[in-house]
Image (cartoon, rainbow, N blue to C red):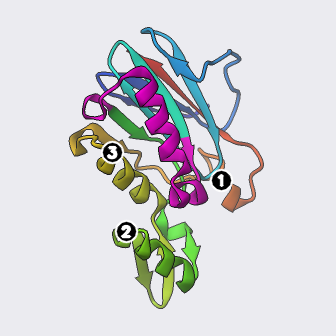
């Protein structure tokens, strides 16, 4: 089994590659060091956000939920309910589908530009692409998270078929991402 790992002062994340998965119960939110939060995803953006020693949560951002703002609204509600200042957060976007595999039509690009995400619109050789992880990053920045506290995985689910599952490659299984509060 191949796994990917990420560590920050606030939390660590293990993305379990193709193969056997650990059997364990996970909660949606971790409030004590050592507790874990898990997200299962195909090509969506699995996002973990936390504050060292006291808070960790996860949210899945699909292209639709990133564009309609519903996922970032869930993050805002969670932070508000816990009294967490976004400036104190660390954020990690785990392996997901990157822009070169997210082809969209011109109408979608126009909509995305209208929503204020021009930076996430790309065109090459007459083909339009959407950078969903960049939209998520912009949303966290607008929320008040410092740029130096946001990290993006360098792994694309579609470009690593021997390691990760990808719906765009015809996989039905999902990737397991487990974060542990420090």
Queried whether the magenta region covers residue 98, the answer comes back as no
Question: CB atoms at circles 2 and 1 under 8 Å apart?
Answer: no
Is any part of residue 139 visible from this angle? yes
Query: Considering depth in this image, is 167 or 130 the residue closer to the camera?
Result: 130
Magenta highlight range: 60-89
Q: In the structure shown, which secondary structural element does the residue marked by tag 1 occupy?
A: loop
In this rendering, the answer to whether 92 lies above or below 36 is: below
Question: CB atoms at circles 2 and 3 under 8 Å apart?
Answer: no
Residue 79 appears at what percent x and percent y? 41, 29
Question: CB atoms at circles 1 and 3 under 8 Å apart?
Answer: no
Q: Disc 1 or 3, which lies upstream in sequence?
A: 3
Based on the displayed image, in which of its 4 quarters is residue 52 positioned? top left
In this rendering, the answer to whether 73 lies above or below 135 is: above
Say whether residue 169 is left or right of residue 89. Answer: right
Q: Residues within 10 Å of mark 3 (few under 14, many from 20)?
A: some
Identify the mark at residue 143; answer none if there is no mark.
3
Q: How crowded is mark 1: few (under 14 residues within 10 Å), some or many (20 or more)?
A: many
Q: In the structure shown, which secondary structural element does the residue marked by tag 2 occupy?
A: loop
Dot 2 corresponds to which residue?
116
Dot 1 corresponds to which residue?
166
Q: Disc 2 or 1, which lies upstream in sequence?
A: 2
Q: Which residue is drawn at 50% across and 16% down?
A: 30
Query: Considering depth in this image, is 134 or 17 the residue closer to the camera?
Result: 134
Between the residue at mark 1 and the residue at mark 3, the CA separation in whole angstroms equals: 29 Å
Q: Residue at x 62, y 48 (%)?
A: 162
Between the residue at mark 2 and the residue at mark 1, the CA separation in whole angstroms equals: 28 Å
Image quarter (top left, top right, bottom left or bottom right) of the C terminus? top left
Query: Considering depth in this image, is 35 or 118 the residue closer to the camera?
Result: 118
Q: Residues within 10 Å of mark 2 (few under 14, many from 20)?
A: few
Identify the mark at residue 124; answer none if there is no mark.
none
Is any part of residue 158 visible from this angle? no
């Amino acid at each position: 089994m191949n796994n990917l790992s990420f560590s920050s002062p606030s939390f660590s994340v293990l993305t379990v590659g193709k193969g056997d998965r650990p059997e364990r119960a996970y909660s949606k939110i971790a409030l004590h060091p050592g507790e874990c939060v898990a997200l299962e995803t195909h090509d969506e953006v699995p996002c973990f956000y936390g504050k060292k020693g006291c808070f960790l949560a996860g949210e899945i951002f699909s292209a639709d939920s990133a564009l309609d703002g519903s996922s970032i609204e869930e993050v805002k509600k969670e932070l508000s309910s816990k009294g967490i200042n976004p400036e104190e957060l660390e954020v990690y976007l785990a392996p997901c589908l990157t822009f070169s595999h997210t082809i969209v039509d011109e109408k979608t690009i126009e909509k995305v530009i209208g929503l204020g995400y021009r930076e996430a619109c790309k065109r090459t050789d007459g083909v339009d692409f959407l950078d969903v992880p960049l939209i998520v990053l912009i949303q966290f920045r607008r929320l008040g998270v410092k740029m130096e506290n946001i990290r993006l995985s360098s792994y694309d689910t579609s470009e690593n078929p021997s390691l990760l599952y990808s719906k765009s490659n015809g996989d039905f299984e999902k990737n397991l991402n487990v974060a542990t509060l420090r």
